[in-house]
Image (tube, rainbow, N blue to C red):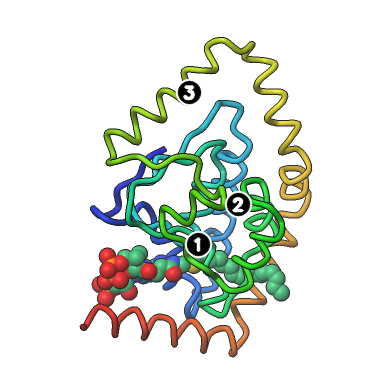
Amino acid sequence: MSQQSSPTVFSAGLDIMEMYKPKPDRVKEFWTTLQDVWLALYGSSFPTVAAINGHSPAGGCLLSLCCEYRIMCPNYSIGLNETKLGIVAPKWFMSSMLGAIPYREAELALTSGRMFSTDEALKIGLIDEVASDKADAIAKSEKFLSQFAKIHPIARKLTKLNLRHSALEWMQENKELDLNIFISFVGQPIVQKSLEKYLEGLKAKQAK
Ligand SMILES: CC/C=C\C/C=C\C/C=C\CCC/C=C/C(=O)SCCNC(=O)CCNC(=O)[C@H](O)C(C)(C)COP(=O)(O)OP(=O)(O)OC[C@H]1O[C@@H](n2cnc3c(N)ncnc32)[C@H](O)[C@@H]1OP(=O)(O)O
């Protein structure tokens, strides 16, 4: 999986404008679409690799965490930075991160909303390899995937899905609850204020 929404951004995460002053007729579709993307990618029976050729905050990091292997190009940033926006990474964002890095690292990263450079991400195991550029990332992805030619496909698939079973089952059983928590959380005035402040910061950075 490689994305290119801009030359330097793998994915900027969720559209903050969908959470800031959310429109009641869109918010349900917005969140359930994200849940479904996560279910499909995290629960994919195929081997998956993220070739991360740009910055990857929050939802962008989540997309890569759905994959079994992450290869990232140099000098970008990655992490679940939700607390920096005054919001909370949902349970399934956290469990995706815990599939990649140890609990202690995840706790420190999540509570502080820390973004990691490519080298820092490699050191803690948030990514698995560094590639020199996008072409190298794709070549390394192909190499990772090619090892499965020697593994029985059913054995590989069942092993992956068993490892991910409890997180997937939780989501399948709690989609509605998770949606309601999201809607009520982002609807709070204090959360709206934080998002407004964060958006102002992005605009101010851009104006410099
Ligand atoms: C009790 C509670 C229990 C459980 C939890 C319950 C509920 C959970 C609630 C919420 C969970 C939500 C989970 C959220 C996930 C997310 O993904 S949030 C989004 C996080 N993303 C970011 O923080 C990215 C911010 N952007 C950047 O850091 C930079 O823009 C960039 C590194 C991606 C790119 O940098 P540049 O190339 O320098 O570009 P600019 O900064 O100049 O930006 C250009 C343009 O784009 C706008 N923009 C950037 N990112 C976003 C975004 N994610 N959404 C909307 N808009 C974005 C930026 O403002 C500029 O806009 P314009 O001025 O051009 O209009």
Q: Residue at x 68, y 65 (%)?
A: 107
The quadrant of the rendering that contains the C terminus is bottom left
Locate residue 131 relative to residue 44 in the image: left or right.
left
| Residue that numbered label 1 is attached to | 58
| Residue that numbered label 2 is attached to | 35
Q: Give the label, 3 or 2, closer to the camera.
A: 3
Q: Nearer the viewer, residue 157 or 148?
A: 148
Does label 1 point to a residue whose CB lies under 8 Å from ligand 1? yes
Indicate the amino acid at tag 1. Ala
Labels 1 and 2 touching (C-beta < 8 A): no
Locate residue 143 relative to residue 128 in the image: left or right.
left
Q: Earlier in the sequence, mark 3 or mark 1?
A: 1
Q: CA distance from mark 3 to mark 1?
A: 26 Å
Q: CA distance from mark 3 to mark 2?
A: 26 Å
Q: Nearer the viewer, residue 66 or 17?
A: 66
Indicate the amino acid at tag 2. Gln
> Pointer 1: residues within 10 angstroms few (<14), some, or many (20+)?
many
In this view, 123 is above or below 155: below
In this view, 180 is above or below 129: below
| Residue that numbered label 3 is attached to | 145
Q: Give x and y (percent) for residue 150.
A: 56, 10
Q: CA distance from mark 1 to mark 2?
A: 14 Å
Q: Residue at x 50, y 62 (%)?
A: 58
Q: Earlier in the sequence, mark 1 or mark 2?
A: 2
Q: Nearer the viewer, residue 87 or 150?
A: 150
Labels 3 and 2 touching (C-beta < 8 A): no
For mark 2, give the secondary structure.
helix
Q: Residue at x 65, y 20 (%)?
A: 156
Q: Quadrant of residue 132?
A: top left
Q: Give x and y (percent) for residue 128.
A: 50, 41
Q: Quadrant of residue 205?
A: bottom left
